[in-house]
Image (tube, rainbow, N blue to C red):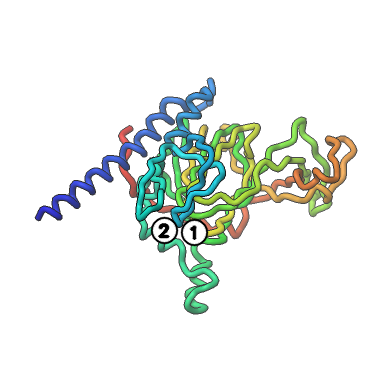
Amino acid sequence: MVFSLFRRYLSMGRHSHTSNKVQALYDHCNAIFSPSSTPPPSSQALHKLSSILGVVQARGIVLYKSGRINSGTFNLACMVNIKTKGHERLCMHTVQPSDVGLSEETTDDDRGHGFFGINQLNRAARWAQPITYIDIHESDSFTMCIFCFPTSSVIPLHDHPGMTVFSKILYGSLHVKAYDWVEPPCTVESKGPGHPQVRLAKLAVDKVMTTPCETSVLYPKHGGNLHCFTAVTPCAVLDILSPPYREDEGRKCTYYHDYPYSTFSTQNGPKICDNEEEEYAWLVEIGTPADLYMRSREYTGPAIQL
């Protein structure tokens, strides 16, 4: 009887803590974002949003799954030292999968068996899994959503016109490759069918991000506004986009293919040294990729009080 009451108490505590996190995200986004992004949120307001998601700079530590602490740079919202069997670990007060309705069972299901599956049937079913889209909240001012990726799944290179986007990896590892347009615009005619125009972009991000890690932020003109996500392991990403995509307001999601800088030549573009060519690419607009396999799922996390 006592044990049952204790478990109920812990469950109530977890639910309350979870609700506060999601509600805090919504309340702050609702306060700082507007449909037209005019005026834009202050840097302090954006920093606070990063802090709610779980980002405060702390130098000198990196947490590994084994519990070891090595030198490096790590971003956390809050850290608490706990001694367990002679080792120190760090507990993080940051947004976790359970805070948005993703249970441990959910993450296990997403992992599948990969190339090390039990048999060919399991392997084929594993790679057939789509990316799962979960809509938490959408308004004229901002969107809160989650993408759950099976291993090796890809959201192709796409843009966020006039938008600011916060991306928080909830679990797993994700490769992020992102560009920003070179200004003033530098374009050339491509050699492909129909001779579509290609535009020069500069690489902003090209790395694997593994939880726990910092929240990434992209802006309309910098920070990697055009990005591609590739799942290294099963992973989930919490996104906050403001203002949201609205095609009738000029915020259409456009997909691109990137070509190495050496593919095209131009006489009018910026002078780029040979050792800097890998930092640039030519982007050409493409249609929505036919192999972009995505499904929607209902949000099952704590309800938001509007």
- Does residue 217 appear in the picture of this structure? yes
- Does residue 41 appear in the picture of this structure? no
Residue situated in front as seen by the camera: 83 or 166: 83
The residue carrying pointer 2 sits among few (fewer than 14), some (14 to 19) or many (20 or more) residues within 10 Å by Cα, namely some
For this view, does 305 lie left or right of residue 266? left
Q: Amino acid at mark 2?
A: Thr
**Picture coordinates of residue 40, whole percent (x, y):** 54, 23
When asked about the image quadrant of residue 221, the answer is top right
**Up/down of 46 relative to 214, above or below:** above
Distance of label 1 from label 2 (alpha carbons):
7 Å
Residue shown at 61% from the left, 35% from the top: 161
Q: Amino acid at mark 1?
A: Pro
**Up/down of 119 relative to 163, above or below:** below
Numbered disc 2: secondary structure: helix
**Picture coordinates of residue 189, whole percent (x, y):** 83, 44
CB-based contact (under 8 Å), mark 1 and mark 2: yes
Residue situated in front as seen by the camera: 148 or 134: 148
For this view, does 6 lie left or right of residue 170? left
Q: Kindly identify which numbered label has been placed on residue 234.
A: 1
Residue situated in front as seen by the camera: 62 or 111: 62
For this view, does 301 lie left or right of residue 138? left
Q: Kindly identify which numbered label has been placed on residue 107.
A: 2
Residue shown at 46% from the left, 29% from the top: 48
Q: Kindly identify which numbered label has been placed on residue 125.
A: none
Q: Earlier in the sequence, mark 1 or mark 2?
A: 2
